């Protein structure tokens, strides 16, 4: 079993930056794809970014160029650096992971992921 714990959410003004972290614990040896999702009130959960075990990253068009995803494989920590935040980025952000399989082109599909964190709130004010 794998546990994911997010941290780093908070409130910021538009144009500001935040850094989210996700710490993985438990039996993490087989984790292959890890990512961040977000869900705003009244909206479906959507993929933000994902990272393969070899370090390749994938981003949603809405965050490309503003968000950077990285992974410390030794410490099993996933970092999401978010810059130039806008009110549209306001959401509950979730860390997700899955064993064995690649993120691939369907990395946005929530059923793909086995493990989920509890979420951390990001609020961007105008």
Image (cartoon, rainbow, N blue to C red):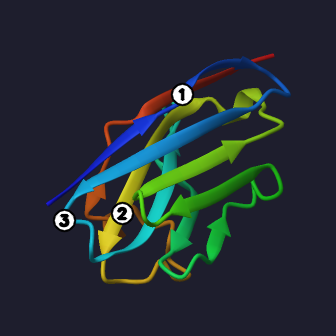
Q: Is residue 123 placed above or below 96 in the rendered structure?
A: above
Q: Is residue 22 left or right of residue 68?
A: left
Percent from the top left, x then y, of residue 14? Answer: 82, 23
Q: Which residue is mark 1?
A: 9
Mark 3 against mark 2, which lies toward the viewer? Answer: 3
Q: Residue at x 61, y 48 (%)?
A: 80
Q: Which secondary structure, mark 2?
A: strand
Nearer-N-terminus badge (2/1)? 1
Percent from the top left, x then y, of residue 43? Answer: 51, 39
Quadrant of residue 112 in the image? bottom left
Q: Is residue 99 left or right of residue 26?
A: right
Q: Is residue 94 left or right of residue 18?
A: left
In the rendered structure, are the residues bearing label 3 and label 1 in contact, judged by CB atoms less than 8 Å apart?
Answer: no
Nearer-N-terminus badge (3/2)? 3
Of residue 26 and residue 69, the one placed in the foreground of this image is 26
Q: Residue at x 79, y 39 (%)?
A: 83
Percent from the top left, x then y, of residue 114? Answer: 26, 64
Residue at mark 2 to residue at mark 1: CA–CA distance: 19 Å
Percent from the top left, x then y, of residue 21? Answer: 50, 42
Residue at mark 3 to residue at mark 1: CA–CA distance: 26 Å
Q: Quadrant of the N terminus?
A: bottom left
Q: Which secondary structure, mark 1?
A: loop
Residue at mark 3 to residue at mark 2: CA–CA distance: 12 Å
Q: Which residue is mark 2?
A: 97
């Amino acid at each position: 079993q794998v546990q994911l714990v997010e941290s780093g959410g908070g409130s910021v003004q538009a144009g500001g930056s935040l850094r989210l972290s996700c710490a993985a614990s438990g039996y993490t040896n087989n984790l292959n794809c890890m990512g961040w999702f977000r869900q705003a009130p009244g909206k479906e959960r959507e993929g933000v970014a994902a990272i393969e075990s070899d370090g390749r990253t994938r981003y949603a068009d809405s965050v490309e160029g503003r968000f950077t995803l990285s992974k410390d494989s030794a410490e099993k920590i996933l970092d999401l650096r978010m810059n130039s935040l806008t009110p549209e980025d306001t959401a509950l952000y979730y860390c997700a992971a899955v064993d064995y399989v690649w993120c691939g082109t369907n990395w946005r599909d929530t059923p793909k992921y086995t493990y989920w964190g509890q979420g951390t709130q990001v609020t961007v004010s105008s």
